Image (tube, rainbow, N blue to C red):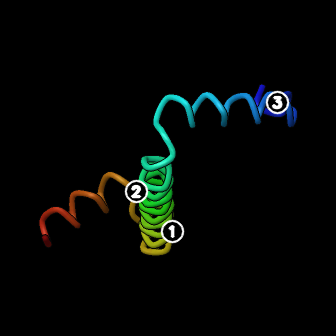
Amino acid sequence: MIGNIGLPELLLILLLVLLLFGSKRLPEIGRSIGLTLKELKRTASRVLDDEEQSRKNGRTGIESKKRNQIMS
């Protein structure tokens, strides 16, 4: 669905965002979105690493999670 958005539609969306939030708040909003995406990527990477480590150790994800909780 997002692939159908062209340049005119994108410009219209950006104009509406500018009108709604104002030019002073846009950098703050962009920064917070960037930090959110960075944290999401970091968390997803940790989950994948934990799953890979569990497979190497021959444990299921639930067993590994219980062991990590006990050790914490």
For label 3, the residue is 5
Marks 3 and 1 sit apart, C-alpha to C-alpha, by: 37 Å
Asked if 70 appears above or below 12 in the picture, the reply is below
Q: Earlier in the sequence, mark 3 or mark 1?
A: 3
Q: Residue at x 14, y 72 (%)?
A: 71
For label 2, the residue is 60
What amino acid type should be assigned to the residue bearing mark 3?
Ile
Where does the image place residue 18, in percent across and percent down from the top left?
57, 37
Where does the image place residue 42, in percent across and percent down from the top left?
45, 65
What amino acid type should be assigned to the residue bearing mark 1?
Glu
Marks 2 and 1 sit apart, C-alpha to C-alpha, by: 10 Å
- 47, 2: nearer the viewer: 2
Marks 2 and 3 sit apart, C-alpha to C-alpha, by: 42 Å
Question: Taking 55 as reference, is 61 left or right?
Answer: left
Q: Tag 3, which secondary structure?
A: loop
For label 1, the residue is 52
Q: Quadrant of the N terminus?
A: top right
